[in-house]
Image: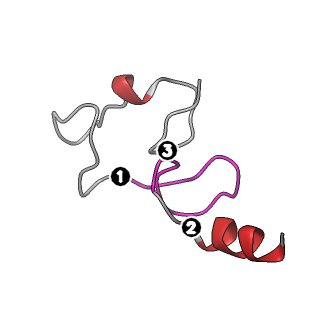
Amino acid sequence: SKCAFCARDHKTSKHKYETCSKRDEICQYTLLKYSNYKEKHASNEAQSQSRTEEKSQI
């Protein structure tokens, strides 16, 4: 599955940083990328610009 923080091929729980010891959470080094839209936010965030626009077109 894709990581909710960076959209890479690992579970979100396995997300880690080279520069600090945090795991499974967002820190100042996180470069967020939503796998479906390539936007800079976590995929599990409640709202995104693309999702909001998509819903308004329905």
Element assignment for label 2: loop
Mark 3 or mark 1: name the one nearer the start of the chain.
Answer: 3
Residue 33: x and y in percent read 54, 53
Q: Are marks 3 and 1 in contact (CB under 8 Å)?
A: yes
Q: Which residues are magenta?
A: 30-45
Q: Which residue is mark 2?
A: 48
Residue 34 included in the magenta stretch of the image:
yes
Alpha carbons under labels 3 and 1: distance apart: 8 Å
Q: Which residue is mark 3?
A: 6
Label 2 crowd (10 A; few <14 / some 14-19 / many >=20) = some
Residue located 57% across and 41% down the image: 7
Mark 1 or mark 2: name the one nearer the start of the chain.
Answer: 1
Q: Which residue is mark 1?
A: 30
Q: Is residue 29 left or right of residue 48?
A: left
Element assignment for label 3: loop
Alpha carbons under labels 1 and 2: distance apart: 18 Å
Element assignment for label 1: loop
- Which quadrant of the figure has residue 12? top left
